Image: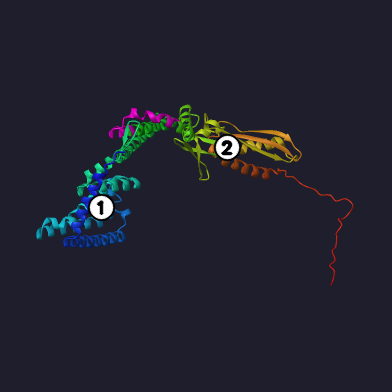
């Protein structure tokens, strides 16, 4: 590690000497008082604006960029007032005395204007975390530049280094790499979202191909962003070969499941065994595929729940796809009647009832079979087709209710088990318990 302690100590000594000289001046306390007064007024105005203004209703019908810009400006009213007050005080003191006696006011005004400008520029970013990170980073750079300490700070960050495999890492290189990478990833996300919207609108592509193209574009843009960020800070990609073995071991152990799910997701998209909109059953979970992600698929159940099933499970486990080649689904209803009923009439009533159902397919007539002469009665099997497996349970219930009404009209009874208890040898003995009187 290359550290020049002499330069650092000299820098700290110079800063301390300058601060000591400034604090001893009475003009320092006058400027400090004006800054505190301006901060108090700005804070009060910020509270008043927040209490009497609903930012969510400002510019509702305006275009999104203009609406966000105005909302940010209204929300930063306190900072704007503070900048105006300190700037005005700076102008007054410059006219009355030496400019060097109002430098703190100039610094405060510039810092406030820099923060206001950064907040207005970042108003178009919807992610709150990115807005805060970018705003704080940009303001720190602006503050160092206003104080004429940007270059010394960069030199100090670049003086500490660590060399690994021919690569020289310094805090400045890492900060630059992180900033460029965040910006590149933000741009890649914008481009990928635009490409996704265009791909989804294409009617010539199947849902599986659409998801596959979106994933490949996102992955390619992310790799491109990382390569651009590394090249921008001077990191040679060939020098990273020393880390390839460690990366392979890490993937083999720590990232095994992640890689397996990613490859399984690609396989599912290529072979088209499942696709968005399919009704599937995996184990005890059933529902429609609402989204196919890099690591999992999202299956929306009919009761509002949503199952996140890893892609590897769909490749290695048994999966029932109700809409793989045909959405038409056979529904089976098993019921029984007593022996007093006419089995031919029962079959006729069952097929007529199933054919009259609204969601039953008219092109495929229902069928009813007598399957067994059981101990309690005759057993029948009614089968009919529905166009969508999602309606299977609803149509089945509708047909069974209609069949029950038809049986009651014809006097046909559904058997149920009857238990008869016979007691031999007369009545059951009853034991009487006599309590002993004390």
Which quadrant would the N terminus be assigned to in this image? top left
Q: Can you give x and y, in whole percent of width and height, for residue 125 in the image?
A: 31, 45
Which quadrant would the C terminus be assigned to in this image? bottom right
Residue located beneath label 2 in the image: 283
Q: Which mark is residue 213?
A: none
Is the magenta region chiefly helix, strand or loop?
Answer: helix
Judged left or right of residue 382, residue 317 is left
Q: Nearer the viewer, residue 391 or 183?
A: 183
Residue extending furthest toward the right: 425
Q: Can you give x and y, in whole percent of width and height, for residue 318 in the image?
A: 57, 32
Residue at 31% x, 30% y: name it. 236
Residue at 70% x, 33% y: name it. 371
Q: Can you give x and y, in whole percent of width and height, for residue 212 in the image?
A: 42, 31
Q: In what element is the residue under mark 1?
A: helix
Judged left or right of residue 95, residue 54 is right
| N-term mark: 1 or 2 | 1
Disc 1 from disc 2: Cα separation = 54 Å
Q: Give the magenta range.
A: 226-248
Q: Quadrant of residue 281?
A: top right
Residue located beneath label 1 in the image: 73
């Amino acid at each position: 590690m290359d550290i020049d302690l002499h330069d650092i100590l000299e820098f700290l000594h110079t800063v301390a000497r300058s601060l000591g000289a400034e604090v001893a001046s009475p003009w320092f306390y006058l400027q400090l008082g004006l800054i505190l007064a301006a901060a108090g007024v700005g804070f009060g105005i910020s509270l008043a604006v927040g209490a009497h203004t609903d930012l969510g209703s400002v510019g509702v019908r305006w275009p999104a960029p203009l609406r966000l810009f105005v909302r940010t400006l209204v929300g930063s009213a306190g900072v704007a007032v503070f900048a105006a007050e300190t700037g005005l005080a700076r102008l007054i003191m410059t006219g009355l005395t030496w400019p060097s006696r109002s430098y703190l006011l100039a610094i405060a005004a510039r810092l406030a204007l820099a923060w206001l400008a950064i907040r207005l520029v970042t108003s178009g970013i919807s992610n709150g975390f990115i807005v805060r990170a970018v705003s704080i980073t940009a303001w720190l750079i602006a503050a160092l530049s206003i104080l004429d300490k940007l270059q010394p700070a960069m030199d100090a960050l670049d003086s500490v280094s660590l060399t690994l495999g021919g690569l020289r890492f310094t805090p400045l290189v890492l900060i630059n790499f992180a900033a460029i990478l965040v910006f590149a990833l933000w741009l890649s996300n914008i481009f990928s979202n635009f490409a996704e919207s265009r791909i989804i609108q294409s009617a010539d592509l199947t849902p599986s191909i659409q998801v596959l193209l979106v994933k490949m574009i996102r992955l390619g843009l992310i790799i491109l962003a990382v390569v651009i960020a590394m090249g921008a800070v001077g990191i040679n990609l060939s020098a990273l070969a020393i880390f390839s073995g460690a990366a392979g071991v890490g993937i083999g152990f720590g990232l095994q499941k992640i890689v397996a799910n990613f490859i399984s997701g690609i396989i599912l998209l290529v072979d088209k065994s499942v696709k968005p909109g399919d009704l599937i059953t995996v184990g005890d979970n059933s529902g429609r595929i609402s989204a196919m992600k890099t690591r999992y698929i999202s299956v929306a159940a009919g009761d509002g729940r949503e199952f996140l099933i890893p892609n590897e499970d769909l490749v290695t486990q048994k999966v029932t796809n109700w809409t793989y080649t045909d959405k038409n689904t056979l529904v089976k209803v098993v019921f029984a009647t007593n022996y007093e009923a006419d089995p031919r009439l029962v079959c006729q009533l069952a097929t007529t009832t199933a054919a009259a159902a609204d969601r039953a397919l008219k092109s495929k007539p229902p069928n009813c079979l007598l399957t067994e002469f059981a101990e309690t009665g005759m057993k029948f099997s009614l089968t009919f087709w529905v166009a969508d497996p999602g309606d299977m349970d609803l149509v089945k219930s509708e047909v069974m209710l209609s069949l029950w009404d038809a049986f009651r009209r014809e006097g046909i009874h559904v058997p149920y088990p009857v238990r008869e208890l016979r007691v031999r040898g007369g009545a059951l003995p009853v034991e009487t318990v006599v309590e002993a009187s004390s």
